[in-house]
Amino acid sequence: MKAIGRFFGYYKPHKRLFIIDLICSFAISVCNMFYPMIARNIMNNYVPNQNLRLLIVWAIVMAAIYAVKSVLTFIVGYWGHVLGVRIQGDMRKDLFNHIERLPFSYFDENKTGSVMSRIINDLFEVSELAHHGPEDVFNSCISVIGALVMLCTINPILALIVLCYIPLMLFFAIRARGSMNKAFEDSRKKVAEINAEIESSVSGVRVTKAYNAENTEEKKFAAVNSRFKKARAEAYRAMGVFHGGMSAFNDFLYLLALVSGGLLFYFGKITGPDFTAYILYITMLLAPLRTLVALFEQIQDGMTGFKRFCQLMDMPTEYEPETPVPADLCGDIVFDNVTFGYKSKEKEVLKGVSFTIGSGKTVALVGSSGGGKTTICHLLPRFYLRDGGTISIGGVDINDVSSADLRDKIAVVQQDVFLFSGSVRDNILYGSPEKSEAEMIVAAKRANIHDYVMTLPDGYDTEVGERGVKLSGGQKQRIAIARAFLKNPPILILDEATSALDNMTEMQIQTALSELSRGRTTLVVAHRLSTVKNADEILVVTDGRITERGTHAELIENEGLYAELYRYQFKTE
């Protein structure tokens, strides 16, 4: 009941349109009631009495009713679907906004294709249900009740026979619905798997071609497609049982009507025109029953989609303090005995990490891959909640500050730069849309990307392609740096920002990064140790712990892991 209430809550902003839709549906049902009764009167009265005038009058009345019905059908068909689309749009907006506020851990454990399926496929079925569900149920119920009332006016015994038969149909429908529910829900999950596989394959198509791995991708897709076909076949088997049973019930209702009505006509309890009207009302009764049967499948798809919608909407959003502390977040960054482990891995990644970054100073994190360097960078802007210890900026615990205030003070430049589809301008201004054109150009010049942008056909309005595919790695990195310059935050995180670049490009980018870091509190993760020689302090992170710390000269003198790594890289380079 709670889910139903939640579903109908989306009708509230559109209640006027919903009421119009129901009124028109009701009027259509009423219009359908006239034909059998008028036909009965014509056969009982007007034709036998040769009353041509009334025959013509009622023919004109029927024509007017059909004209009104066509207008009402247009309203229901057009505005009813508009109602469904508007409700779908509201749900999609709420779902997208909620997804944007989910924690990083959700995206670690859920594939992009699966999330897309929730937003697109599921909500399409929900919108169809939002339009057709209440309208068809209301229309069908009115038609069934109206037909039964009219049958009572013809002969109460015939009406009672039909009334006793209908509950048997409903009992079967309810029993068959259970297996359909499970089968269609499983089918929906397999659709999400297919979406995820397609998204992964299309995104990685360049790697696939580079390694001639088309056959591998085809086999992976064939496997998930096979599971989908099997699940869908099982869903249609359950649906076939349902439709087959309901079809048999419909046919036997016709048979029952013919036999019972025929017997009463034979024994003179009803007239020939009454018998004809009775059969017409049975036909009218079967139409809404068939609609209800078809509606079961739509309800199944729609409610399964809405259930998955609710599951995602009920996912807890990213942590926010109940009473956030207003803070400028200026001063030293302090990690005090911080512990953390990713829930999906069930393994502790950081084990009592403690260090301080003085205001305006640069601290570098080095060490082997998987040691916890990037995790430290993720904890500072609170992409993940620490398990233990404290992280503070200027004496203020970051858990006491709103995520918006916290991240407003931090810029992140990563190794894997993500550019959004759009222009160079859009990507530099991303996160700082209020900045002026002049400020954007200054930021681009400081990142050494302005001169290149001016050589492009449309300058700053040039499209970068999906994920910046039209640009080189160095160009994308410069745009990311320009984005950080424009944001102008007091705290900067450089997470292996140059490790994927060649030496010449790295030297050029390093100049821009040095300019960007000046006067800011900076946390650097470095793969090439030569880039962090001038850091105020270097921390060696090994297996979630800080095993060495000091300046470059001090660590070289200590002859520890850092000195070993540095000599190895120096020799290699």
Image (cartoon, grey):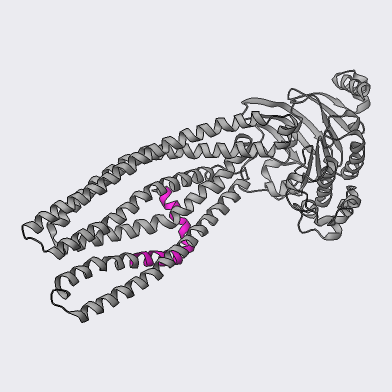
In the image, residue 352 lies in the stretch drawn in magenta: no
Tell me: 201 left or right of 62. right
In the image, residue 25 lies in the stretch drawn in magenta: yes
Residue 493 in percent (x, y) is at 80, 39
Residue 279 in percent (x, y) is at 20, 58
Tell me: 571 left or right of 395. right
Residue stretch in magenta: 3-26
Return the residue found at the far bottom: 53
Regarding residue 33, the answer to whether it shows in the image is yes
Assign the C terminus to one quadrant of the image: top right
Residue 116 in percent (x, y) is at 59, 44
Q: Quadrant of residue 500?
A: top right
| Above or below, comparing residue 204 to residue 290 in the picture | above
Q: Quadrant of residue 90?
A: bottom right
Q: Residue at x 91, y 27 (%)?
A: 552
Q: Nearer the viewer, residue 570 or 229?
A: 229
Regarding residue 343, the answer to whether it shows in the image is no
Q: Nearer the viewer, residue 480 or 370?
A: 480
| Above or below, comparing residue 491 to residue 25 in the picture | above
Return the residue found at the far left: 267
Residue 501 in percent (x, y) is at 85, 35
Tell me: 56 left or right of 463. left
| Above or below, comparing residue 353 to residue 237 in the picture | above
Tell me: 433 left or right of 20. right
Q: Main secondary structure of the magenta part?
A: helix
Q: Quadrant of residue 344?
A: top right
| Above or below, comparing residue 526 to residue 273 in the picture | above
